[in-house]
Amino acid sequence: MKFPATNFARPFGLMTLAAGILALSAPVVLASQNECGTSGADIIRKAYPAAKSTSEGIFEVGGETIKLPMDSGDDPHSMICRIWPARPELTLVAVPLMREQSDDGNEGDIELLVVDSDRLDLKARLRLPKLMSDDAVFVSSVAFDTARYHLAPGKTAFGLRLSLQGSSRPNPFGETALWLFLLDGDALSPVLDNIVVAEGQGEWDTNCAGEFHDTARTLSMSPSAQKAFADIVVSEKKTTAISTPDKDGECIDKKQTTAGEYRLRYEGAAYRVPKELQRME
């Protein structure tokens, strides 16, 4: 079974930069996935008993800010919820815990919660330090990936995707990274850490001339002859496009595509991700 990674559209030739940037930051799971509904505040109160409501939709706890999801659903600093299709009695929650927020950058963590879908009782939690910290390259979206990642009999992982986006028009940049987590009893642990599933970057004159590089990766499970846990096969497609104006001023794109493959093996407690597949720090 294959799971699609985010596809990147770049501002090649006649494409607008704005359209390219939007495609860069789009997560594989639709924004409409947020299923907190009216339960967001109750989840926060159960998971963070010391949290205080300071204004509508805002909680403070231990010097950190928690923001309930808004109707627009486009704020990466708001909590998100998703009923886990593999185990619908459970709901997955990602809570950005923000310490600092400004135009120059942000500082914060994400805490993952697994709660009972009916009673909202907390089943497991895991804090991911600094995942919401950014500056010139900023976090543009956070989303759950609930494709059925069957890693071993009775062990299905869920994913979290985080997208970053640059703000430079002549040097556009964006990437989406994926983490996978396993729930075992009341223990939540990462089994795949920080693999880039989509990336796009380039340099151009904001009119036509430039060079752009896109990478898209898909994950598939492959039985392992040596271990109970399946191998993860990462299929990679890289595209380079060079745009130049012709003698009539028309923008001409020349593209070259290469393909590759990686095999990730479960090593004791997690899959080892090669450094070249990891997101920027």
Image (cartoon, grey):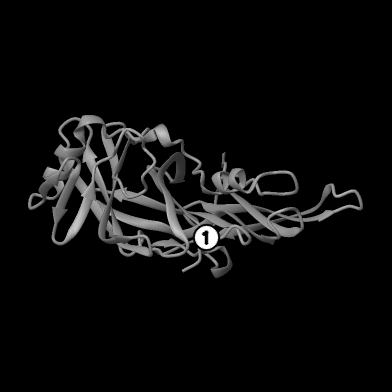
- Can residue 220 be spotted in the picture? no
Residue at horizontal 61 percent and vertical 47 percent from the top: 20
Q: Position of residue 251 (x, y in %)?
A: 81, 49
Relative image position of residue 164 (x, y in whole percent): 48, 56
- 79 and 242: which one is in front? 242
Residue found at the very far front of the displayed protein? 248
Q: Secondary structure at mark 1?
A: loop
Q: Residue at x 12, y 44 (%)?
A: 45
Tally the marks: 1
Residue farthest to the right? Answer: 247
- Write the residue at 20% across / 33% down: 39
Is 251 situated left or right of 165 in this image?
right
Q: Determine the residue positioned at 53% across, 57% down.
A: 196
36 or 236: nearer the viewer: 36
Residue 130: image x %, image y %?
33, 64
**Depth check: 242 or 251 in front?**
251
Q: Residues within 10 Å of mark 1 (few under 14, many from 20)?
A: some
Image position, residue 262 (x, y; %): 62, 59
Residue at the spot of label 1:
265
Is residue 231 among what the camera can see?
A: yes
Q: Amino acid at mark 1?
A: Arg
